[in-house]
Amino acid sequence: MAALEKFSGLSPVAKATALTRLVHAETMRARDAGADELRASNILVHDLSGYIAAILDGRTSPEQDAAVLQALSAAPHLIAQLDALLAKKG
């Protein structure tokens, strides 16, 4: 997936910014979710927000990058948004 490959090459600040926008989008989508979908959304938001905190604390690792990219790959609606965000950045 091109968006995930592009994401991997971003600076820490750009990663945190992109993930913050995705977390915001996911919380909006979850408003209309059923119980099972809401739980999956909550787990995703938890994982992404934890990664944002790690970025801001300067304590990321390649393993964390891989785990977050795997979580994102299971959320095609967010991949599409990430792709659009990265296209704007050029």
Image (cartoon, helix red, strand yellow):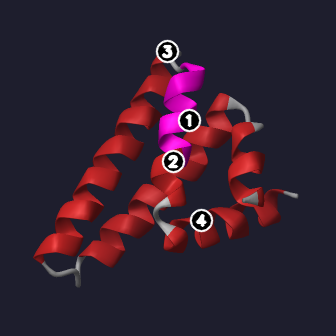
The C terminus: image quadrant = bottom right
| Disc 4 element | helix
* Residue located beneath label 2 in the image: 70
Whether pointer 3 and pointer 1 mark residues with C-beta atoms closer than 8 Å, the reply is: no
Q: Seen from this angle, which residue lies furthest right?
A: 90
Secondary structure beneath label 2: helix
Distance from the alpha carbon under mark 1 to that under mark 4? 15 Å
Foreground: 76 or 25? 76
Boundaries of the magenta span: 61-69
User: Does residue 21 appear anywhere in the picture?
Assistant: no
In the image, what residue type sits under mark 3?
Arg
The residues tagged by marks 1 and 2 sit, at their Cα atoms, a distance apart of 6 Å
Q: Is residue 57 above or below residue 44?
A: above
Disc 1 and disc 4 in contact, CB within 8 angstroms: no
Residue at image location 68% in from the left, 51% down from the top: 4
- Determine which residue is flagged by label 3: 59
Q: Position of residue 16 (x, y in %)?
A: 55, 40
Q: Comparing marks 2 and 4, which lies closer to the viewer?
A: 2
Closer-to-camera residue (77/13): 77
Left or right of 17 in this view: 74: left
Dot label at residue 79 = 4
Say if residue 19 shows up in the picture.
Answer: yes
Q: Are marks 1 and 2 in contact (CB under 8 Å)?
A: yes
What's under tag 1, amino acid-wise?
A: Ala
- Mark 2 or 4, nearer chain start: 2
What kind of residue is marked 2?
A: Gln
Question: Which residue is tagged 1?
Answer: 66
6 sits left or right of 90 in the view: left
Q: Secondary structure at mark 1?
A: helix
Please give left or right for residue 78 compared with residue 31 in the image: right
Crowd class of label 1 (few under 14; some 14 to 19; many from 20; radius 10 Å) = few
